[in-house]
Amino acid sequence: MQFRLATEDDFDACLQLLRANGRVSPSEATLQALPALWSAYLAQDRRRPKPFAVWEDAAADGTMVLHAFGVAVFVSDAVYADLLQSAGPSIADAYYGLVLDGAPGIALDTQAIARANAGQGLNLISPMYVQRYWDFQHPDTQRLLPLTAAAWYLNITGFNVRRMLSEYHGERAAQYICASGAQRVRSFAPPEGRPAESHAPIWFEHHRERMPPAGVFDSMSHWIKPPPPPRMRLTPAQQSIAFLALQGDTDQRIAARLQITTDAVKKAWRAIIAHASLSIPALRSGALVRDGLVEGEAAVRGTERRRIVIEFLRQHLEELRPWPRSRAGASNAGL
């Protein structure tokens, strides 16, 4: 089983899973509108990867089977407050209803995210997370859980997230999510004929100011604490290329996703490694760093240098998040 960022080619499979999942049940109007809404979301700031992930596995015939998908969106304080006061029980209906009403700026763009990252923090909502099997004891669910956490870590860590709103169903899921530090903020009756124990929609909030100490499943407090500002001078394009590489994408796949040439990806990697050499001593043994560029003979070459950079960025995901360029530059002044 693996996870990756979604593309428009995944929409049909996502909708099929959504209609068959038996728990998450937005209205038919929302279901009909989702392909266009998802497409517009992925197109916003086209080269900035979005936290819209799919989890899949290879079937016996070699085809890929979708096991789960999830969407997360950064919104303004006003939108977050509107969602908390909405009628419910579906966060998807509440959020996508606002989008369909045509209000501008429902999902924050890169500039707004950058300002919030450098300020008081972001509001994150998860309008939809759907999986094929909801039974925690199912072997596919057991394989899925650690990959869900891994995808969440890659897509969210390094953002200055202040609070998060999500929807789960039933008491078993509620116990699991509460162990991560979440608090119930809304509870709803289950669909007619469905047991509350497994199907009652419950909304949860992780809030930075109300996070408990780490518990048995470990608190999510380390994911929603203010991250340090980035130190490198990576451009938004370089950040996007490096982020996609963290998921294992080849230069060819990155070029196709970002609609650029493979040569442009390789050129960007040379610049990324030069910037990273200011922060990673292993890249510059015996080399001279001047004006952000490496001069002289470096001890580490080729694919190994890229691997070192990727592992460093995996531990410093703030380097790949939107940040006001002037403030990012100021944070590098002493390097």
Image: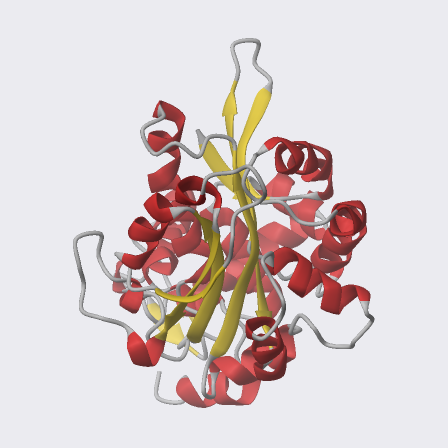
Q: Nearer the viewer, residue 112 or 250?
A: 112
Tell me which residue sits at (69%, 37%) in the image: 15
Mark yes or no: residue 113 visible: yes
Whole-percent x, y for residue 188 in the image? 51, 57
Whole-percent x, y for residue 243 in the image? 51, 55
Tell me which residue sits at (63%, 38%) in the image: 18
Q: Nearer the viewer, residue 273 or 231?
A: 231
| Number of marks | 0
Query: Is the residue 229 above or below the residue 305 in the image?
Result: below
Q: Which quadrant of the view contains residue 101?
A: bottom right
Lateral position of residue 134 relative to residue 190, left or right: left
Q: Nearer the viewer, residue 220 or 134?
A: 134
Whole-percent x, y for residue 102 in the image? 83, 71
Quadrant (top left, top right, bottom left, bottom right) of the N terminus: top left
Quadrant (top left, top right, bottom left, bottom right) of the C terminus: bottom left
Looking at this view, name the residue that lies furthest to the front.
Answer: 193
Whole-percent x, y for residue 321 in the image? 50, 69
Tell me which residue sits at (40%, 26%) in the image: 140
Q: Nearer the viewer, residue 275 or 113?
A: 113
Tell me which residue sits at (50%, 77%) in the image: 122
